[in-house]
Image (cartoon, rainbow, N blue to C red):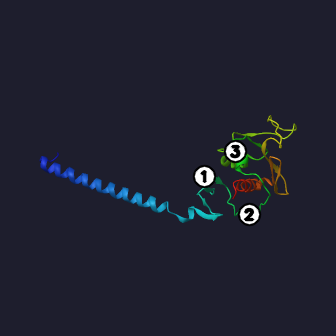
Amino acid sequence: MKKIITRDKQSKKDKKNQLIIGGILIVVMLFSTIGFAVGNRSEGDSKKIEYKGINFEQDSSGEWRFMISNQEFVTKYNPEETANVSFFSYLSINDYMDEPLYFVGGASEVNYEIARNLGKYVLRIQEACLDENCSGDFPIKNCSVDNVVVFEESEQEEIYIEDNCVFISSSFENQTIYADAFLFKILGI
């Protein structure tokens, strides 16, 4: 049998329980906020470098982010890591502005590396062929007219340019580092 209590005592008991529950919620919220702030300030999560006046920051996924003219770019490698890849290039980002860009060969990862950085500048990006001996049903493009990036698997690693075609010759494993070197060059880094 339940003891009969007055409204005044019941009101005091309810208020006491509300204060206890409220205090517990405040403590939980305070510790979760502190834990979130401390957990996200880990210095090991990001690495920063400055290269030719441009700040590069590596995010938790290992990709490098940087800004040029208020535009964000994302690459797998930073310019220091591509320093051994040298080539002569007269091309700049302006040569690709509002023009179609075609890829011949290359793994989807390396094509994506260039597409995600140049996609906002070019008219469209599409796979293509340079001659009729193409394995896919792609349009045939010409280096003297079209902007084409050609990936060739080769032990002799180099980047060279013929007319509007950029040839990236490298082992399969190094295609992305060579693609990033190409990007840095046309961005003027």
Q: Disc 2 to disc 3, how far (Cα)?
A: 26 Å
**Residue 5 seen in this snapshot:** no
The amino acid type found where label 2 is placed reads Ala
Which residue sits at x=19%, y=52%? 13
- Cα distance, mark 1 to mark 2? 21 Å
Q: Please tell me which residue lies in front, 165 or 29.
A: 165
Amino acid, disc 1: Glu
* Residue 183: percent from left, percent from top: 71, 53
Residue at numbered disc 1: 72
Q: Quadrant of residue 90?
A: bottom right
Please, is residue 61 above or below residue 102 in the view?
below
Q: Is residue 155 left or right of residue 57?
A: right
At which x and y percent is residue 138?
A: 79, 36
Residue in the foreground of this view, choosing between 2 and 177? 177
State whether residue 95 appears in this view.
yes
Whichever of labels 1 and 2 marks the residue nearer the N terminus, that label is 1
Q: Nearer the viewer, mark 3 or mark 1?
A: 3
Residue at numbered disc 3: 97
